[in-house]
């Protein structure tokens, strides 16, 4: 069993990310909760810089809590923009396009962890 704490200064030490399969100069991430702490989920901060856009098929269920900025999602013919304080959910298998004009900082949780 594990109980841990990750301090904000550590958790916001973001590195270039291979978000959705390719490294981007506009995507930075830190997995605060990851293997070996948890073998079933991943959680951490994601920062997308202004102008970031990506389309992908989600390989996990994902919950995003918006801390700064905004992100526009398009999925199954519907679009919405998430802003500070909003929570967005992406179901595993969903084909999603997202983009941000101003950039954003998100706390994200994914389940299950991809092996």
Image (tube, rainbow, N blue to C red):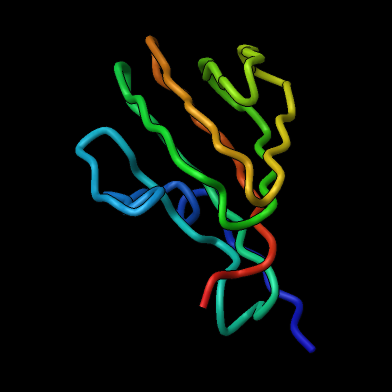
Q: Position of residue 34 (x, y in %)?
A: 56, 71
Q: Is residue 109 visible?
A: yes
Vertical order, 26 against 77 (above or below): below
* Residue at the image point whose x is 65% and y is 12% from the top: 80
Query: How many marks overall?
Result: 0
Vertical order, 32 against 78 (above or below): below
Quarter occupied by the N terminus: bottom right
Which residue sits furthest right? 1
Q: Position of residue 12 (x, y in %)?
A: 45, 46
* Residue at the image point whose x is 44% and y is 55% from the top: 30
Query: In this view of the protein, which residue sits in the foreground, 26 or 37?
Result: 26
Query: In this view of the protein, which residue sits in the foreground, 60 or 13?
Result: 60
Vertical order, 115 against 87 (above or below): below
* Residue at the image point whose x is 60% and y is 66% from the top: 33
Left of 79 or right of it: where is 11?
Answer: left
Q: Is residue 13 visible?
A: no
Image quadrant where residue 85 sits = top right
Q: Position of residue 41 (x, y in %)?
A: 67, 67
Left of 82 or right of it: where is 3?
Answer: right
Vertical order, 9 against 27 (above or below): below
């Amino acid at each position: 069993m594990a109980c841990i704490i990750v301090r904000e200064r550590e958790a916001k030490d973001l590195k270039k990310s291979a978000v959705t399969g390719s490294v981007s100069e506009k995507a930075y991430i830190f997995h605060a909760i990851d293997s070996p702490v948890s073998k079933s989920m991943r959680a951490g901060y994601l920062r997308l810089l202004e102008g970031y856009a990506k389309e992908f098929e989600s390989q996990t269920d994902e919950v995003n809590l918006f801390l700064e900025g905004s992100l526009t999602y398009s999925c199954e013919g519907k679009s919405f923009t998430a802003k500070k304080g909003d929570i967005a959910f992406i179901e595993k298998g969903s084909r999603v396009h997202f983009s941000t004009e101003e950039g954003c900082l998100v706390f994200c949780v994914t389940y299950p962890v991809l092996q």
